[in-house]
Amino acid sequence: MTTPAQSVRIPEGAVYACDNGRFGRGWPGATRWWSWLVTTVDRYGLDRCAFAVAPDEPMDAHATLRLSAPWLPRIRDQHVPAAFVAQDGCEEGLIPWDDLDVLFLGGSTDWKTGPAARRVTLQARERGIPVHMGRVNSLKRLRLAQDFGCTSADGTFLAFGPDQNLPRLLSWLTAVNTTANPPLPGL
């Protein structure tokens, strides 16, 4: 996962996704975000881009729909799968199913780990839409993402102490990939 605020180089051959930076301090504004997105996809390749996240408003489903609606078709026009961030309250008919390629579970921790997020994940899977869960920074959360049926997940756990946290993260991936559930493809 990369954002406009990062100066990360995507390793050769790695699959990547482009977040918008709205959660936290990385949002550069719509014009600079769009330029960054196009440049990033040009640099690292369309074939390796899992998805790009349309602008959202964390924890606000109505504002997210308003912000995302004009960008979802523009992302798709670049031949990039468009991700829509599901937020608190989006289960009330605020998900533009026909305009997205990936459902991104965002929102508050309580919402994202609760029954409403599980229901929208099921709705996405019934439509053949992959689901990504953001802010997955523990084995417990990774297992929850797998239990929901998410096809990918991301978090910042590794960024805070890579030497110490990489072995732990690898053990989590081994744990979820050796359960009775199907393996969780990683980004």
Image (spheres, rainbow, N blue to C red):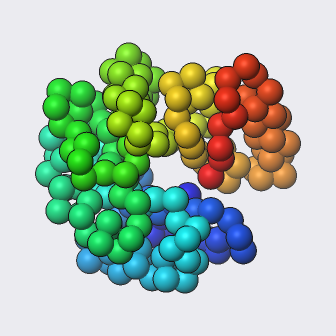
Q: Is residue 79 above or below residue 182?
A: below
Can residue 94 be seen?
yes
Residue 2 visible, this angle: no
Tell me which residue sits at (34%, 45%) in the image.
85
Return the x and y of residue 13 as percentages of the image width and height: 71, 70
Q: Is residue 32 above or below residue 97?
A: below
Q: In the rendered image, which quarter is residue 21 located in?
A: bottom left
Position of 166 compared to 39: left or right?
right
Q: Residue at x 26, y 69 (%)?
A: 74
Query: Percent from the top left, x then y, of residue 132?
Result: 48, 42
Residue at 35%, 22% in the rendered image: 119
Outermost residue, top side? 115
Relative to 175, 128 lies left or right: left
Q: Residue at x 51, y 73 (%)?
A: 46
Q: Report how many numbered discs are placed on residues in the image.
A: 0
Quarter the N terminus occupies: bottom right
Residue 72 x, y percent position in the rendering: 26, 60
Seen from the viewer's position, the closer of residues 124 and 61 is 124
The percent coordinates of residue 41 (x first, y second) are: 48, 76
* 93 lies above or below 51: above
